[in-house]
Amino acid sequence: MNSRSVASRPNEDVMADMAGAVYSTGAAAAGSAGVIDVLILEDSRFDAELLGEALSAALPHAQTRAVRDERDFVAALAERSPSLILSDYELPGFSGAEALEIARRMAPETPFIFVSGVIGEDNAVELLKRGATDYVSKGRLARLPVVLDRALKEAADRRAKRVAESQLQAANEAYREAESRRLALMELGDRIRDIDAPAEIAYVASAMLGERLGVDRAGYGLVDKAAETISIDRDWTAPGVASLAGLLRFRDYGSYIEDLLRGATVAFADARLDPRTRDNADALVALTARAVVNMPLTERGGLVGLLYLNHGQVREWTQDELDFVRETGDRVRSAIARREAQIELQAFAESLERQVEERAAELESAREQLRQSQKLEAVGQLTGGLAHDFNNLLAAISGSLELMRRRAIDGQPAELERYIGVAQGAVKRAAALTHRLLAFSRRQTLEPKPLNANRLVSDMEELLRRTLGPEIELERVAAVGLWNVHADPSQLENALLNLCINARDAMPEGGKLVIETGNRWVDARTAKERDMPMGQYVSLTVSDNGVGMTSEVVARAFDPFFTTKPIGMGTGLGLSMIYGFAKQSGGQVRIYSEPGTGTSVSIYLPRHDAQEEAASEPVEAPLAPRAHQGDTVLVVDDEPALRMIIVEVMRGLGYATLEAGDGAGALRILQSPRQRIDLLVSDVGLPGGMNGRQVADAARTARPGLKVLFITGYAENAVLSHGHLDPGMHVMTKPFEMDVLARRVKELIESR
């Protein structure tokens, strides 16, 4: 035994200590049945045997290899990377430090542990800095099991982390590719929406596929199943690649027509190897189509078209690529079918008009069919226009965010404000569009207040006179002692303005318009006639002496899209929106009209006993007012991104901010007696069986008078008790600017 051998105690004592220290070494990293390959670099045979015995006690499943010099050490590493390396520090003609450097090059992931009797503390620290995992003194081999266990676990953790990072990178790349393709499909939808020619629709889609997938040719053709041919009007090709426009016979290029007729996609990487095409491979290669994707497009279960990709070289097609081609094909066929249907509908309308001229017994029937067709077309135009507008707005927001991200990465913050402005502008336009839709569908968010209709009409009189013009005489008839109502002031103003504009348009030669208010008692018989609950109401009536309406027109006046105005002069949504507002407010709208006499439209709103709030002078609110010391806000929203933003804004303004993602989490905070909470900011729609209103009601049981601000994406009217909120409860509609939210929070906390 040389100077580095363990001589301080007999081997039996050392082994007894080590057996007592072993607890789970190796099992956590390699499993109870796994084999751990240990490479021992030790020139002393006695010490190598001692280490082998120690390893057998610590790692029962270990497989050891012992080497004595640099040549054998390098050869062992070249044969296979071990699970562990145990190395002496001083070796003849060779050092442990040199062995460590070799191991870092040849087996960088393998834990390297020095086992030496002469390594000093300074040397050990330096070796650890250079990549050693740990070191054990030969005089303290009882510590070896713990060191081995930690080294194996750390190595396993590093491998697991590396695998996880690799999987995460792959997932991110897959997500980016999927998102890129999703945006490409959205852009394709926008581009082909307004294209009339089916062939042009197919070409635009083919060009998008060809450019994104980097193939030599992409196109669309119509299939004649009986003749087994494909007719191609136009295809997209890479530079120098010839078009396949014309008529082609499938059988000239193989037997895959049989698969297409069954609706199966035909995809092969090499025409010379695919059994369906190898006998005709030369014909395909001559067409720059050695690799092919043929995606059948079916209608009513039959093959009608083919979307194809050709490439001149061998190419494997991934499942993601095939899915992308399928989605593109579905959109192409849908767009072409829609355009063909429009052409057929137009031809049908023209045919109907000819039949009307030829057969007057059939005039009324044809008109009704044409009216239904036009109504469907109007609905299609509305939904198409809305989808177009929203897609444009989303594209503006997405593009601005992407540019902000790029500028931030490039360290160019100067242009961030401009991109932020673009995104905020798009958000505001999207919110305005949403509000118009909600008004039409009678689900707009209302913020009712006690108000007096006489004062509202008086405040609007000057605006109304300017709107009506000098040809219209405006008269006000204000009831004395008019009751108050509980309604959204801005919505009632909009309703009155709409009714006055309708009345003006009904008097093209001028006339008289009367705005009248009154208190109304609606008994059971009248309530049944007017489809409203019996009780006390305030009426707001706009009357004119214009052209009037027939009973048929009156019956349809509240129908969406119905209008008697010329094309381009009205949307047919005004009265429908007024009707929705009145019904949401617990009231009703009624029309009284006769042709040639005039029209009266009355809005009925329930009486409300609360006094109207005094109007305050508008003041310019400071941007983002800061909190007072200790002001505390609880934010409840199940959308993590929005909740995070609100919490960040509140904390940035000095509020102590708590957060919860559902009602149960919010109640746990609210029911903590020592927790100060000045304001509850809660979404209305929450998961878990408890909505925002229920959270607020439960919170007020434990905290009477707690102020509440509801935030909602649309009017959950039933949840908010049909707009009748308790004192101290308020509502804001998403989306909103953070500065507006900050001012509202400050205002509510400071209100008494």
Image (cartoon, rainbow, N blue to C red):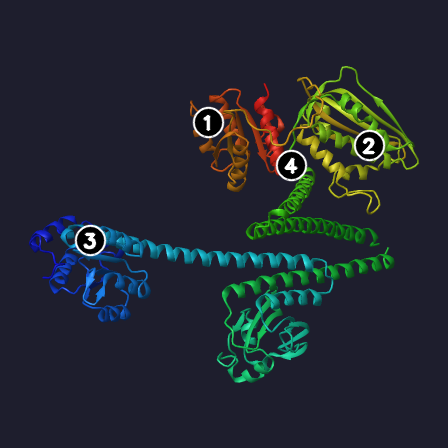
Of the two numbered discs 2 and 3 on the same chain, state the one appearing first in sequence. 3
Q: Secondary structure at mark 4?
A: loop
Q: Are marks 1 and 4 in contact (CB under 8 Å)?
A: no
Q: Quadrant of residue 260?
A: bottom right
Please tell me which of labels 1 and 4 falls first in the chain.
4
Q: Which residue is mark 1?
A: 670
Determine whether label 2 and label 3 are within 8 Å by CB.
Answer: no
Q: Is residue 28 visible?
A: no
The residue that disc 4 covers is: 443
Q: How far apart in space, not on screen, are marks 4 and 3 (Cα)?
A: 74 Å
Marks 1 & 2, CB-CB < 8 Å contact:
no
Q: Marks 2 and 3: which is nearer the front?
A: 3
Give me the disc on residue 136.
3
Image spot of residue 342 (x, y percent):
73, 59
Task: Classify mark 3: helix, strand or loop.
Answer: strand
Discs 4/3, front: 3
Q: Which residue is mark 2?
A: 500
Instruction: Indicate which label's residue lies in the foreground, 1 or 2.
Output: 1
Alpha carbon separation for disc pair 1 and 4: 30 Å
- Count of picture labels: 4
Q: Between residues 298 and 175, which one lies in front from this camera angle?
A: 175
217 relative to 97 in the view: left or right: right
| Vertical order, 629 against 299 (above or below) | above
| Front residue of 358 and 746 | 746
Task: Measuring from the top left, give residue 313's x and y in whole percent.
Answer: 54, 77
The reply to whether residue 383 is in sight is yes
